[in-house]
Amino acid sequence: MRLGALLLCILFPFSSMADSAWPGGIAFLDLGAADGPAPVVEFDGKRVLVLNQGGQWRAVVGIPLSAETGRASISFPSGITMSFDVVEHAYAVEHLQVAQSYVSLSDEDLARYQRERKVIDAALNNWRDIPVDSVSLASPVEGPRSSSFGKRRFFNNEPRSPHSGMDIAAPEGTPVSAPLAGIVSETGDYYFNGNTIFIDHGQGLISMYCHLSEIGVETGQPITAGEPIGRVGKTGRVTGAHLHFGTYLNGTAVDPALLLDGSQ
Ligand SMILES: [Zn+2]
């Protein structure tokens, strides 16, 4: 270890913990002793979640899958910035076959998708200013992870957006439970995502559950950790029954595997 790195570790003993600062990953940045109000932090013009962990403020920054590698920075209202490195991360490629109506959208379906996109984006960008003491999530359903986050995908051989969540295979009807307490911020039946629930866990940490056969909660409903919220299904653009589990920080999709218990 070089002397500079050693000194940094002494000054910021938590700064290197479980770092996953790559596109689609999370940068955990130490902001010093939590002996005053929580610092206001922004990344790319969006508020960032700040935890009080062991008496230290810690920023939990979602890095977009589309982010360039290299230097990035968070900013404070004073204009001061703190930089960190976004490192490279390799994601696999995946080919999937679905009904052609999910690849070449009719005018009507495209209009529907565009209307829904606004509702979904609003749910994913919601900021609820409450203290958050943990971003550790329990698995919403048990089962094999049939497709991992970040894969570059081809549907019927046509390139589409990379996979923005984790797919967990489970039989239709399997109960899905909330991985952390929160409030149901939106539910709906969407063209690609099928029956979907959004849970707002505070400070921009949002989780999303797609392709459900059944939605068991209502918008505005408070949810405790472990509470059943719906059932696994195959609604929307799917190749079979599974849960698409999405997690978002500062409005950007991050790999749920980085937030599941024991990962951070
Ligand atoms: Zn998925």
Image (spheres, rainbow, N blue to C red):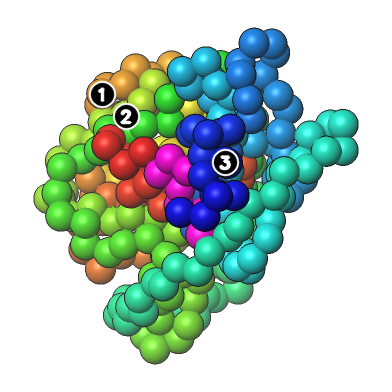
Residue situated furthest bottom in the rendering: 157
Residue at mark 3: 7
Q: Mark 3 or 1 closer to N-term? A: 3
Does label 2 or label 3 sit earlier along the sequence? 3
Which label lies toward us, 2 or 3?
Answer: 3
Which kind of residue does numbered mark 1 sit on? Answer: Gly
Which mark's residue is nearer the viewer, 3 or 1? 3
The first of marks 1 and 2 along the sequence is 2
Q: Alpha-carbon distance for marks 2 and 3?
A: 41 Å
The amino acid at mark 2 is: Ala
4 part of magenta stretch = no
Residue 87 rendering spot, x and y as whole percentages: 53, 64
Where 5 sits versus 186, above or below? below
Q: Which residues are magenta?
A: 15-22
Determine contact: label 1, label 2, CB under 8 Å.
Answer: yes
Identity, as a three-letter code, of the amino acid under mark 3: Leu
For mark 2, does the 10 Å Cα neighbourhood hold few (<14), some (14 to 19), or many (20 or more) residues? many
Q: Which residue is located at x 33 percent, y 54 percent?
A: 166
State the image coordinates of residue 121 (x, y, percent, origin top left): 61, 48
Which residue is labeled 1 in the image? 226
Circle 3 residues within 10 Å: few <14, some 14–19, many ≥20 = few
Spatial CA span between label 1 and label 2: 5 Å
The label on residue 178 is: 2
